[in-house]
Amino acid sequence: MRFTEKYGITPTAEDDWFDPLLFADSRIHPDPFRIYADEGTAWAGAHEELLDFFEMVLRLIEESRGDTSSLPWRCACRLLMFPEPEEFCMGYSQGSVDGSGTSTKLQATMLDGASKAADLHILRPEHMELLVLFGDGVGADRIGDIVCNVLKGRFIKYTQEVVRRHDVPVKEFRVRHGSWSRSFKRWDDGVFLLPENPFARHRRGGPLLLCPRRFLRDLPTVDPSDFWSWSWENYNQELRDSFNYDIATNLRMRETKRIARQRPDIAVAYLEQLEEEPKPAYDLEEDPKLVKSWEAGRDFANRNPLSFVPQTTHEFDEWVRSVVEAFAHGLKERGGWKVLWYKGRPRGENIVQEFFKSTAIHYCRANRIDLTPEANAGRGPVDFKFVQNWDARALIEVKLTNNSKYWDGLQKQTVQYLKSEELDTAYYVSVGYYDKDFEKDRMDRVREVAADVSKRSGRTIEPVFVDARPQPSASRL
């Protein structure tokens, strides 16, 4: 369910915000360079606000003189905590909107970069991204986390303007890192009137924040590998003279950190070039990462309807299998495979799982059945768990056949999930893109392993093969 569906909103030309999926994170992120390019709009000053924040941190680190027990150092550490901002429904924790709790690792990386900047007497870098290059590397969504935390006050005001315009009901919510104080060198939580996301905070409800579409990208602008390539292309001879490069070892991450720290002028030049020519926003029309999986799943389910509603536990098991079979049939026979290919290349497993989930959710909604994606099942995440009541539950695990952990998942993980959830039956859905995935010997081997594991564990693991190979059109048959 998207924000517009929940609140019955019909967007107008004035609405430039991304319509978030409420129950799972979309794999896109706000890019600071896209925000910098908006300096002439209501977002003017956002760049300066980011710089002010990190100047405050850098001066605290300089004041501490490396004493990790000092008050300035402890203040800097607290300021460099960037929890995943679940209010935005963006990131990589797709099973929910509650984040993955990696803020401590991000803190260590940023603290490392900030300490080096202070050592070099860089107390107001023109780009906070310089600290990313000084550190040990920051993932795609972590850069977005920094932006969302530091600029959260701006996003709150932006969201409040949208909901006032559309008369969306609001509630009082306490928002973590609602603002930050330069005077007191700290984050401040705050209470704000915001729309509710009923799926947030383990479905107890939480605040929702919106972000302009033009700020979003699927990958970060500042990418250490991209910096390495750019530096090598633009400063080839200087780097050869200054560093003992062994290209064959391909130690790009380590060399990236070394270049940035020993030649900050190169890092600054790289960031200035990105500011002059910001990379384009994520193309929601082309949708290479299938961000609009909810709509794709809805359309697929409508084209491939199920024929019955389960009334008993036995029928429930049949119904769960019919969901998988409808998915398999629709992909192969009704053109659904096209969703899983983009510009002649197959999509990754996470996108396949997301598409299946979006399809299955629409089947579930029609039959009043709960679907829990990536539920915490004791020892690890389960892909999908269907629940009608305590006596009618089933597990579906979706894997690409070329997944390096395919056999481990079949022989160990699925059995453990069944034990943890006290379930008896699992469907091991194998999605293949190539002819070799459907060779008879391989499929027979999968069936034999599944039968053996089922016999030894006392639980049933049923393999299902899903053909996602490109199919010829009916006119060519």
Image (cartoon, grey):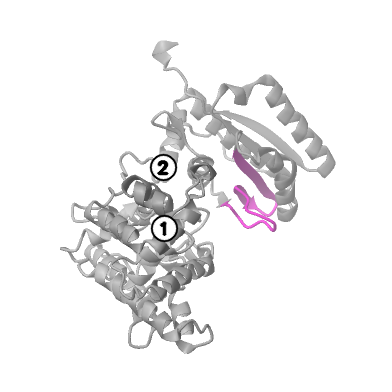
The location of residue 258, given as percent across then percent down, is 45, 59
Q: Could you tell me if residue 470 is visible in this image?
A: yes
66 vs 128: above or below: below
Q: Residues within 10 Å of mark 1 (few under 14, many from 20)?
A: many
The location of residue 205, given as percent across then percent down, is 46, 67
- Please tell me whether residue 381 belongs to the stretch shown in magenta: yes
The location of residue 94, given as percent across then percent down, is 50, 53
The location of residue 114, given as percent across then percent down, is 42, 72
Q: Could you tell me if residue 92 is visible in this image?
A: no
Q: Quadrant of the C terminus?
A: top left
Amino acid, disc 1:
Ile
Decide which of 380, 306 is in the foreground and name it.
380
115 vs 1: above or below: below
Boundaries of the magenta span: 373-399
Reading the image, the residue beneath label 2 is: 290
Q: Are marks 1 and 2 in contact (CB under 8 Å)?
A: no
Q: Residues within 10 Å of mark 2 (few under 14, many from 20)?
A: many
Q: Residue at x 40, y 66 (%)?
A: 131
Residue 446: name its quadrant: top right
Label 2: element kind = loop
Decide which of 287, 225 is in the foreground and name it.
225
Mark seen at residue 259: 1
Seen in the image, is 43 located left or right of residue 146? left
